[in-house]
Amino acid sequence: MDICDSSDVLPNLGVRALVNDEQIAIYRVQGQLYAIGSIDPFSGAAVLSRGIVGDVKGQLVVASPIYKQHFNLATGVCLEEPSVRVKSYPVREIAGRVQVLV
Amino acid sequence: MKKQKIVVVGNGMVGHKFIDTLLASSNADQYQIVTIAEEPRLAYDRVQLSAYFSGSTAEDLMLTSETYYQEKGVSYKLNEKVVELKPEENCVVTASGHKETYDQLVLATGSYPFVPPVPGREQPHCLVYRTIEDLEAITASAKQSKVGVVVGGGLLGLEAANALKNLGLETHVVEFAPRLMAVQLDEGGGQVLRSKIEKLGVKVHTEKNTQEIVAGEKCRYRMIFADGNYLETDMILFSAGIRPRDELARKFGLGVGERGGIVINNYCQTTVPNIYAIGECALWSNRIFGLVAPGYQMARVAVSHITGGTEQFLGADMSTKLKLLGVEVASIGDAQARTPGALSYVYQDGINEIYKRLVLSPDGKKLIGAVLVGDSSAYGNLLQICLNHMEVPESPEQLIVPASDGQAATGLGVDALPETATICSCHDVSKGAICCAVRDGATTIGAIKSSTKAGTGCGGCVALATQVMNSELTKLGVDICTDVCEHFSYTRQELYHLVRVGNIRTFEELIEKHGRGLGCDICKPLVASILASCWNELIMKNELAHLQDTNDYFMANMQKSGTYSIVPRVAGGEITPDKLIALGMVGKKYRLYTKITGGQRIDLFGAQLEDLPAIWQELIDAGFETGHAYGKAVRTVKSCVGSTWCRYGVLDSVGMAIAIEERYKGLRAPHKLKFAVSGCTRECAEAQSKDVGVIATENGWSLYVCGNGGMKPRHADLFATGLDDQTLLKYIDRFLMFYVRTADRLQRTSVWMDNLEGGLKYLKSVIIDDKLGVGAELEKEMQMVIDAYQCEWKSTISDPEKLKRFRTFVNSNKRDNTVVFVEEREQIRPANEEEIVRFVEANELETA
Ligand SMILES: Cc1cc2nc3c(=O)[nH]c(=O)nc-3n(C[C@H](O)[C@H](O)[C@H](O)COP(=O)(O)OP(=O)(O)OC[C@H]3O[C@@H](n4cnc5c(N)ncnc54)[C@H](O)[C@@H]3O)c2cc1C
């Protein structure tokens, strides 16, 4: 699924995409793209694209801006409660466009 | 019900403590309190009296204020001495003839300095050392004197000697006994102390009994001793012990001791049940307690008894630790080994002049006393072992022998203390209470202080309380690590310093030079805040944007549904009708929920991300600026209408509030900052609940600092009075910048101050007296922040690249369908879960 121009996804600043009613958060960290579900399972709000990205205990993560849980960018697993996870999506960059496989 | 009337005679340290404790009790409202004070001011910290000579003002020493008493409904009379006591009529009469009846009477008259009946003692320049007025007299006398003598080589005498020395006099101490501090020290300790003090240039004369004071030849006076020798001096300070002020009790039929003191029972009642005596004037079990901690204990007991409690006074430990003329001295329990059969260990270091003695019970198992001179670091440990009757280690000398290299000093350690061990004797806080506070989440000494009060009296137990806290934290498995997070092995204060000194402008540069990894949601906003405090660059810049919490990033407050609220700045809470209309129009047009905030502004809720720029465009066109409600930053300056409109107003509080808000707007800090300005002491703006509170008085502005509302409300402390506009702003500049520089992440000003060693006093010395010499620097740094201010929203709106960030979806113009509102009281509110389900079902029906 074609999403947007490469230049729309800036380093460390998440964006949100709508694909068949699914809200997907896309990030660029250390040159690599990541895509996970954008709805924070703890609050039900679609806010994960608006979290701060970084690394915690060796994992690349985004922190939910509502209650601050961390989600692994590659797997969507919540660090604080590993039984909770958001979906993760394959994502790639081709010819200056960002594409997500849904 | 009629209130019980309680009259407190004497508003010294203990009298005030009694009032404060009663005010804090749960049925405080059942009592009407009146206090009659002979001194011209309310209670001050007599223990710290000598600080007056090193620059503290009477104001600094105050333990309370007239404003506080007024607020709490405590009536007080200053400069009034009670001269008559009529137990049958339940009333007292003052020297000016004022009569005051009571239901309960509390005598807290303290003591007076004993002046031996030496002929010639009543001449000018023969002084005592007890009140602020005494100190003023000493200062005045010192100006006309070259030589000074202190009569009395006890604890207070040596403190007085220090004062004379600091006033530049050639100083002598004349002592009747064969050694210094005869009450607290043994022979060996006294000798070491003497030798140390003489090295500091104070001349000590022991076994001298002054017979007469006559005119001198070289100096103003000559003191003639019983042994025929004499000493010439220009001034004499008597510090030969204290005597209880029991004259009222004595004259009007209450029981007094043979050698003075108002007799009390375990409830602090005198021989007349509705008259209590507490503090240095009281005699319990034939003993007078000349220290403040036992006095405080009595105050608590009396309050307890009056309010129906069962606490008793059962004596108090008189161990002391102090610094006299810079020499550490401590004495515990039976320091002179008077207990029959007592055993001793003595450690003496002749080179560094250190003397330590342990006094053990005859079986050698228990510590019953100790003397420490030159190094009192073992005091806390020894005191606990002694007070808790703990067994000493196998070779007790370990307790006083210095640790050999690389080895930790031996002590039983705080872990060995029983839960009931009293750590803070001023506020009677046990080890158990501190551990309990730690388990309840107090993890800094500041938090311990505010939740248990430990360490907030004389401050002597702070080190021990910290050890107890750390030990408990370790037990709980809490790492006592001050690193901000895994990416930086530094505290916030250290990072601030690195940024400032290294002129670092981006997170990347900082983490590369001083950290590791990519950063996280702890260190990124923290560094963003530090960078903003230092350089105040636009937080929207690309290299700064990714550091910001979502609120700062979108410059709005995210609410639980993921929508935002908007709060434009309304400086001082002053707003024109046109601006009000503009806010109303925006609210209506974008269907926002509107509410007035506690900070005197208007909050617009329920805005979706993509609407923020358009909303702000309209607000800016109407003349608004961003209000930083989303940032850890200066929020609001609340004000009352002040002298412009109010009948009672003294100064223009609105004008000052606006000036302050305009000055500091945009300043980012470790936590949010709230201010207020009241136009008179009625305090309608509630300035005393703010980080910075300003109250107008006839003499200028009073500045209060470090208050807050919220989960743990705290009154602000009075910081300075009688300020003109310029000085007020100067102090606030320095205060804020010092806070920004030294506070921890997310630490409000109150906790920050509690954690500063020396607390309020230290803060005053830094801000007012510029003790660290950083005043000008702090002002300069503040000026830089002020000069760099820009309205973040205004700059953002004019930058199309930045506006892209507000798109809800990068690939669609649809709105976020997880956001659903319903109506309530004619406004929107977020739908709850059930309502959302219904809404979705209805939608599906429609589309089907
Ligand atoms: C220089 C100095 C240093 C000290 N250092 C220490 C120390 O390091 N540690 C320590 O524990 N203690 C120290 N103390 C002792 C401590 O200050 C006292 O224990 C404490 O102040 C006792 O409190 P109080 O309320 O009983 O008496 P005070 O504080 O003396 O208060 C009594 C008040 O009652 C007033 N009063 C008396 N009679 C009347 C009357 N008839 N009518 C109206 N008012 C009356 C007096 O004017 C006075 O203001 C020190 C004292 C001094 C002077």
Image (cartoon, helix red, strand yellow):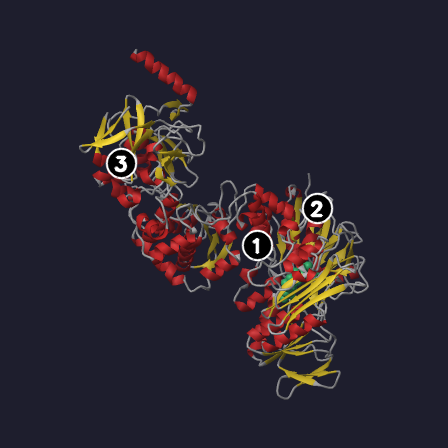
SS at circle 3: helix
Q: Which residue is mark 1?
A: B66
Q: Secondary structure at mark 1?
A: helix
Q: Quadrant of the N terminus of chain B?
A: top right
Kindly indicate whether the residue at mark 2 contacts the one at mark 1 (C-beta within 8 angstroms): no
Farthest-out residue, left:
A95
Residue B684 % position (x, y): 48, 45
Rendered location of residue B837, percent (x, y): 39, 18
How busy is the neighbourhood of tag 3: few (under 14 within 10 Å), some, or many (20 plus)? some
Amino acid at the residue labelled 2: Ser
Figure quadrant, ligand 1: bottom right
**Residue in the foreground of this view, choosing between B102 and B592:** B592
The 10 Å Cα crowd at callout 2, few under 14, some 14 to 19, many 20 or more, is: some
Q: Disc 3 residue type? A: Arg
The number of callouts visible is 3
- Of marks 3 and 2, which one's residue comes earlier in the chain? 2
Mark 3 and mark 2 in contact? Answer it, CB < 8 Å.
no
- Residue at 79% x, 65% y: name it: B259
Give the foreground label among 3 and 1.
Answer: 3
- Tell if the residue under mark 1 belongs to the same chain as the one under mark 2: yes
Q: Which amino acid, mark 1?
A: Glu
Label whose residue precedes the other's in the sequence (3 or 1):
1
Comparing labels 3 and 2, the label whose residue is closer to the camera: 3
Residue at mark 2: chain: B
Using the image as rendered, state which of residue B163 and residue B452 is in the foreground. Answer: B452
Mark 1 or mark 2, earlier in chain? 1
Q: Pointer 2: what residue?
A: B304
Question: Distance between the Cα atoms at labels 3 and 2?
Answer: 63 Å
C-alpha span from label 3 to label 1: 55 Å
Q: Are marks 3 and 1 in contact (CB under 8 Å)?
A: no
Labels 3 and 2 in the same subunit: yes
